[in-house]
Amino acid sequence: MSRLLAAVRGWRGLAVCKSCVLRRFSIQPAQQKKIPNRYLGQPSPFTHPHLLKPGEVTPGLSQVEYSLRRHKLMTLIQKEAQGWEGLDHTVILLSNPMYYMSNDIPYVFHQDTNFLYLCGFQEPDSILVLQSLPGKALPSHKAMLFVPRRDPSRELWDGPRSGTDGAIALTGVDEAYTIEEFGHLVAKLKGESNKVWYDVTKPVHKELHTDYMQPLAEIKARSKNHIQGIRHLVQNLRLIKSPAEIERMKIAGRVTSEAFIETMFARKSPVDEAFLYAKFEFECRARGADILAYPPVVAGGNRSNTLHYVKNNQLIKDGEMVLLDGGCESSCYVSDITRTWPINGRFTKPQAELYQAVLDIQKSCLSLCSPGMSLENIYSLMLSLIGQKLKDLGILKSSITDSHFFKVAAQPDESNVCRSVPSEYEELGDRGGISSLIPAEGRSSLEGVIRMVQGEVAVRRYCPHHVGHYLGMDVHDTPDISRSVPLQPGMVITIEPGLYIPEDDVSAPERFRGIGVRIEDDVVIADDSPLILSADCPKEIYDIEQICGRSS
């Protein structure tokens, strides 16, 4: 084990940017406009002083923070636009629309997170525009919001709207107009001198896209000045969290950890998965969470081997374990935590063996969460550690050697290739058909690859998912960012190894069948040691049994 860890730690020497050049920029806050003395379309310091301080757009995040984000985005555009001198640049982001579950019955509105990241405005049917200033070089720009017009008849039914005055005063943008006026701006963007940055292929608001952006995109497609995507630049900014963002995520992690503890207190058997779902959601909301971050997995017994089981409608029997994968959203930032525990409060010996194996693997992975590593590096290590644990437990046969797992961990690029090899090659080494066609001098390397494929396929049978993902405003945050990117201070990730032994797996020892275990924590990458946002959520066997020994 120590040899493995030492080898993988060697990747820490990879070059990594220790301080982002964008952080050197500073801007002076504009003179703040007075918040209207009325309710807006979202909480404001005037109506919700218990949530927002003066100058904040959303809890804990000020107008200055949002302005700095826009400034950083225009700085990235300045770099991307080298060679396009003489052009005016316009960035356009659409809000989400309101979605409906049935006639006139809306879902709870949730803003598009790229739009929200840059302005904090939480009303549907809106547009954010960042436009370069004539005669001034980027990143100088002005920010404009196009928002729904105030309408007393609609506000009677749907609640207040911010209007143009409220949008400017709350968010700190330079100008605001009604959504109907956006067409006048679009007409000015058709010329060759205007470079438009907008995600044509992934419109978040189909109606606004069809009415305004699709016609513009068709005109631009026939010109030399095509529309340029913006999503990847925003995601690059979102990848590194500011201190204020990390504070928001600390709150989400603490709230979720406490909700887990209270849900463990509520143990009884048999218990309905729906009861634990309701208990968990109540405890999150009671502590200030806005909503759950996603439909939680509350999976008892063998159902824990279904990775995204969300029906949550079955009874959990005495002697079974429950896997709860849940998180909350608090002030636009989310948590994502998983714990597994025995519903009667006591681990059986097989449950404890499998659980401790996953916990040991998770701790080893957490120890590697440092600058220079990557999620892909840690994933490769996880596969190796899982392979060794499966052998120790007698789930994998001894014919697959530790060296095969070690190669998977020590050569992440090769393991990426191996993951694309079809599973039907699992037994290729035994058949030997292909190797007989290879010259003798090439057979050893081929056989080595085959053994690596065998080892990895066997391991991924019992843990088919990655070690983790990026976390932030979304649960699967910044999805376009590769997991091979070296970790940097300020990134937030999850670490979530698991072992899943289906009850019909006759190749596994009978005592483990029907048990699924996953342990997931939220981690902030730091210069020294990682900050575990979910550290308050118990995961040691002793601690879990002590908590489950109490009643709620």
Image (cartoon, grey):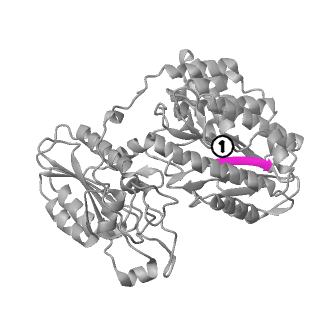
At a point 58% along the width and 38% down the height, the residue shown is 523
Relative height, residue 388 to residue 536 (above, below): above
**54 with respect to 360 (left or right):** left
- Image coordinates for residue 255, horizontal then vertical, percent: 64, 52
Instruction: Look at label 1 and name its amino acid.
Output: Glu
Quadrant of res 390: top right
Asked whether 433 or 487 is in front, the reply is 487
- Image coordinates for residue 420, horizontal then vertical, percent: 53, 38
Quadrant of res 329: bottom right
Q: Which residues are magenta?
A: 337-341
**309 with respect to 268 (left or right):** left
Farthest residue toward the bottom?
153
At a point 40% along the width and 52% down the height, the residue shown is 117
Q: Can you see residue 91?
A: yes
At a point 72% along the width and 47% down the height, the residue shown is 339
What is the secondary structure assignment of the residue under circle 1?
Answer: loop
Asked whether 516 or 89 is in front, the reply is 89
- Image coordinates for residue 129, horizontal then vertical, percent: 27, 57
Relative height, residue 458 to residue 49 (above, below): above
Relative height, residue 64 to residue 440 (above, below): below
Q: Can you see residue 386?
A: no
**426 with respect to 38 (left or right):** right
Q: Quadrant of the N terminus?
A: top right
The residue singled out by tag 1 in the image is 520
At a point 66% along the width and 31% down the height, the residue shown is 455
Q: Main secondary structure of the magenta part?
A: strand
Asked whether 270 or 310 is in front, the reply is 270
Magenta stretch holds residue 488: no
**11 with respect to 503 (left or right):** left
Farthest residue toward the top?
441
Asked whether 223 or 318 is in front, the reply is 318
